Image (tube, rainbow, N blue to C red):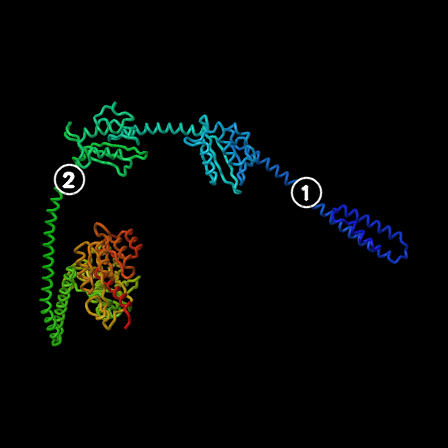
């Protein structure tokens, strides 16, 4: 018994398959069972052997089930493989059928350039090599096989080896198409396309009939175009002819024959340009600077960069000399078109117009001189009037002041009502006359541009308080409510003239308001303040909005010294224009009126210690500003320079952008301000000048562009360059604000002591 396990192990050889091992285990189990049955019942080891036999039988059964499961899996796998093989064959057959059904020749090379499959139409146009095109053929051999066909025809000037090299280089591309010519005039289009796995699909299509049809159609189109061109040329009033790149005549019209006095038999297709040039040279008189040889040189030139044009004369004939214009223009194929136009009538009309222009210019010059004399007389008269008004005003104010004082003294001494009433009327009359003289002086100064302005930061709070104290009694006397809203902040203006503007607007509002109220308010805007005077008075019709600002105009009554001469709003209009303040009006009959004055705002109050005192002289530590002015108009330059120098600004004045750039490069000066006119005449314009200045100076300077144009395009160009556009005419207030901001910026950059 001790040797049986070893015997069993030897019987179970490792090389046996599962079925053989099962058979051996069954035999062993049966032998063990028989041995147990043959042993005596009282043998001690019988039961142990039986147990081992039972365990062995269980193991055999488990192994048997595993083997059966493995066999089932193997059978299923074999079935799947068989089905996949059948599907692959079916797909191959379907692919072959589909490729064969393609109307064009098709071939597929793999990533190693080996032929995988092709249909029967592939290279069927080369029947002598079809039987050599079999799967397994490499691409290089395929090219040589094609080149060896007797039906193959390489392109003109190319050998078969050169054709193979060309196809080999094109084969490296992902996709290309070429048309290959064969013998007997047949044509085939070859297309190669790279596949996703690196292979190549080749498609061949015979296009012989298609290309022949296209060539025939192209020929018909060319014939039709030639007929259309001929008809078009015949309808032109010019004499026209066309030459090809070899200077041979292609087309012409009958007018050319008439203008050259040539019989039609001399003009025929293929005639060289030299023959036509000989006719031109002998029949026409060319100008000295553009002789006939210049035309011949242009026609024979390889590169005709520009067209050729010249006016020639034909002497003699009916009607005298004739003027003709010759014009030659190159066409795309290397030829050119030559036209001849009779411009005699046009030249004569042009001469007549020129003579008429000369006459008109003489008349305009004479009239201009007359107008200049009249303007000079008007200016002298205006200056005389201004001097007269100023002199009269000065001479009258003294006795008026004395009379006012005497009337005031009498009022203190007279208590009786009747005499006192008369004296009060005299005093009101004297006040009216004083106001009239002051208004006339203001108008005179404003019109003459001689008003003394001190443009500086003006505080709104004290100004509004003064207006409230001054006009509250006047409004109460008429039973009106005067509302002056408290205002804060500072604006850039002339203190006296801004107050005079608001005084006149308030007086006007109270005069024309019968009941209700008058409102004075300051409304902030972006960088500006809108000062408004609003009333609930009679209102003004839209047609009269402009009329009320004229001198001596009152809508409801005649002008008089006692009731007012209508100068208040005229002074407002001129003072606002001089200061550069926009004046607005909203009004309608029965709905009151709203007058507005828009003033530039400033965030910084003036230094009370004298560090900042406006633009006039004064201020020991006031920053020194240097301004570069580029303006080609002498009068405008003189006005700008004079005003800036009055305000203590150092001015560098030049008349062109080139001079400005050269001046700064030579001197090394870095101006604080650069104010440049847009239109500077010939050469560099204002934008180009500012671009150069900004490139050289960087951010150390501030830049403005002056122009009378209000176009959006110029505004966009200025915005793109980062400069501010100043619209002409430029108000002194606007210029003053620029200088004030520059000084304030310089002050902030100064080192603190």
Crowding at dot 1, Cα within 10 Å, few <14 / some 14-19 / many 20+, comes out as: few
Marker disc for residue 469: none
**Which is in the foreground here, disc 1 or disc 2?**
1
Relative vertical location of residue 303 with respect to residue 667 in this rendering, above or below: above
- In the picture, residue 211 is in which quadrant? top left
Question: In the current view of this chain or complex, which residue is farthest to the top?
Answer: 265
Residue 229 picture location, percent across and down: 31, 29
Q: Is 664 or 523 nearer to us in this picture?
A: 664
Image quarter hosting the N terminus: bottom right
The answer to whether 533 appears left or right of 384 in the picture is right
Residue 586 shows in the view:
no
| Residue plotted at (86% across, 56% down) | 47
Residue 548 picture location, percent across and down: 20, 58
The answer to whether 57 appears left or right of 210 in the picture is right
Secondary structure of residue under mark 2: helix
Q: Is 733 or 260 nearer to us in this picture?
A: 260
Image quarter hosting the C terminus: bottom left
Q: Is 595 or 37 nearer to us in this picture?
A: 37
Marker disc for residue 78: 1
| Residue plotted at (11% across, 77% down) | 413
Crowding at dot 2, Cα within 10 Å, few <14 / some 14-19 / many 20+, comes out as: few
Secondary structure of residue under mark 1: helix
Residue 379 picture location, percent across and down: 11, 56
- The reply to whether dot 1 and dot 2 touch (C-beta < 8 Å) is no
- In the picture, residue 357 is in which quadrant? top left
Residue 248 picture location, percent across and down: 29, 29
Sequence-wise first label, 1 or 2: 1
- In the picture, residue 600 is in which quadrant? bottom left
Q: Which residue is mark 2?
A: 354
């Amino acid at each position: 018994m001790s040797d049986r396990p070893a015997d069993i192990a030897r019987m179970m050889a490792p090389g046996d398959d599962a079925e053989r091992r099962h058979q051996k285990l069954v035999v062993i189990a049966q032998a063990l069972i028989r041995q147990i049955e043959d042993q005596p019942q009282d043998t001690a080891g019988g039961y142990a052997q039986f147990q081992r036999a039972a365990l062995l039988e269980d193991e055999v059964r488990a192994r048997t089930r595993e083997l059966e499961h493995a066999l089932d899996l193997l059978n299923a796998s074999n079935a799947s493989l068989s089905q996949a093989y059948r599907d692959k064959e079916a797909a191959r057959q379907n692919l072959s059928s589909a490729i064969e059904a393609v109307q064009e020749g098709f071939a597929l090379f793999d990533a190693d350039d080996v032929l995988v499959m092709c249909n029967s139409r592939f290279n069927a146009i080369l029947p002598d090599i079809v039987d050599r095109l079999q799967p397994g053929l490499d691409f290089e051999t395929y090219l040589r096989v094609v080149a060896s066909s007797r039906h193959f025809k390489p392109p003109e000037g190319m050998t078969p080896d050169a054709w193979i090299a060309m196809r080999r280089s094109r084969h490296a591309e992902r996709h290309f198409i070429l048309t290959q010519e064969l013998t007997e005039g047949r044509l085939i289009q070859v297309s190669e396309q790279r596949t996703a796995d690196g292979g190549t699909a080749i498609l061949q299509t015979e296009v012989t009939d298609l290309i022949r049809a296209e060539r025939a159609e192209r020929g018909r189109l060319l014939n039709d175009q030639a007929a259309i061109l001929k008809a078009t040329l015949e309808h032109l009033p010019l004499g026209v002819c066309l030459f090809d790149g070899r200077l041979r005549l292609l087309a012409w019209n009958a007018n050319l024959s008439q203008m050259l006095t040539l019989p039609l038999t001399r003009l025929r297709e293929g005639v060289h340009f030299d023959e036509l040039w000989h006719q031109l040279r002998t029949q026409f008189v060319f100008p000295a600077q553009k002789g006939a040889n210049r035309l011949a040189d242009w026609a024979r030139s390889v590169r005709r960069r520009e067209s050729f044009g010249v006016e020639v004369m034909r002497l003699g004939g009916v009607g005298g000399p004739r003027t003709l214009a010759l014009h030659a223009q190159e066409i795309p194929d290397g030829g050119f078109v030559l036209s001849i136009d009779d411009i005699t009538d046009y030249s004569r009309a042009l001469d007549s117009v020129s003579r008429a222009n000369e006459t008109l210019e003489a008349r305009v010059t004479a009239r201009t001189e007359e107008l200049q004399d009249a303007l000079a007389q008007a200016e002298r008269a205006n200056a005389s009037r201004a001097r007269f008004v100023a002199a009269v005003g000065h001479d009258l104010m003294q006795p008026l002041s004395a009379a006012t004082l005497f009337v005031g003294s009498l009022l203190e001494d007279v208590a009786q009502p009747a005499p006192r009433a008369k004296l009060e009327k005299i005093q009101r009359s004297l006040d009216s006359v004083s106001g009239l003289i002051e208004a006339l002086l203001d108008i005179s100064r404003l019109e003459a541009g001689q008003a003394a302005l001190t443009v500086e930061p003006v505080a709104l709070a004290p100004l509004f308080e003064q207006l409230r104290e001054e006009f509250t009694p006047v409004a109460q006397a008429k039973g009106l409510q005067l509302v002056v809203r408290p205002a804060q902040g500072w604006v850039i203006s002339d203190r006296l003239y801004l107050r005079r503007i608001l005084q006149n607007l308030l007086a006007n509002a109270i005069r024309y308001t019968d009941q209700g109220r008058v409102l004075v308010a300051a409304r902030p805007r972006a960088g500006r303040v809108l000062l408004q005077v609003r009333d609930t008075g009679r209102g003004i019709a839209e047609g009269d909005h402009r009329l009320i600002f004229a001198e001596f105009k009152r809508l409801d009554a005649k002008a008089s010294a006692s009731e007012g001469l209508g100068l208040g709003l005229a002074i407002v209009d001129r003072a606002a224009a001089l200061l550069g303040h926009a004046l607005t009006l909203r009004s309608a009959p029965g709905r009151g009126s709203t007058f507005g004055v828009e003033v530039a705002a400033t965030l910084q109050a003036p230094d009370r210690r004298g560090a900042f005192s406006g633009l006039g002289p004064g201020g020991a530590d006031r920053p020194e500003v240097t301004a570069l002015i580029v303006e080609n108009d002498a009068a405008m330059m003189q006005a700008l320079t004079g005003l800036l120098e009055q305000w203590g600004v150092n001015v560098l004045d030049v008349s062109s952008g080139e001079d400005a750039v050269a001046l700064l490069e030579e001197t090394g000066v870095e101006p604080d301000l650069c104010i440049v006119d847009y239109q500077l005449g010939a050469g560099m314009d204002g934008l180009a000048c500012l671009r150069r200045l900004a490139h050289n100076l960087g951010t150390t300077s501030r830049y403005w562009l002056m122009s009378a144009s209000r176009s959006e395009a110029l505004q966009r160009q200025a915005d793109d360059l980062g400069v501010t556009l100043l619209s002409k005419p430029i108000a002194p207030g606007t210029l003053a604000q620029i200088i004030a901001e520059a000084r304030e910026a310089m002050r902030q950059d100064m080192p603190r002591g």
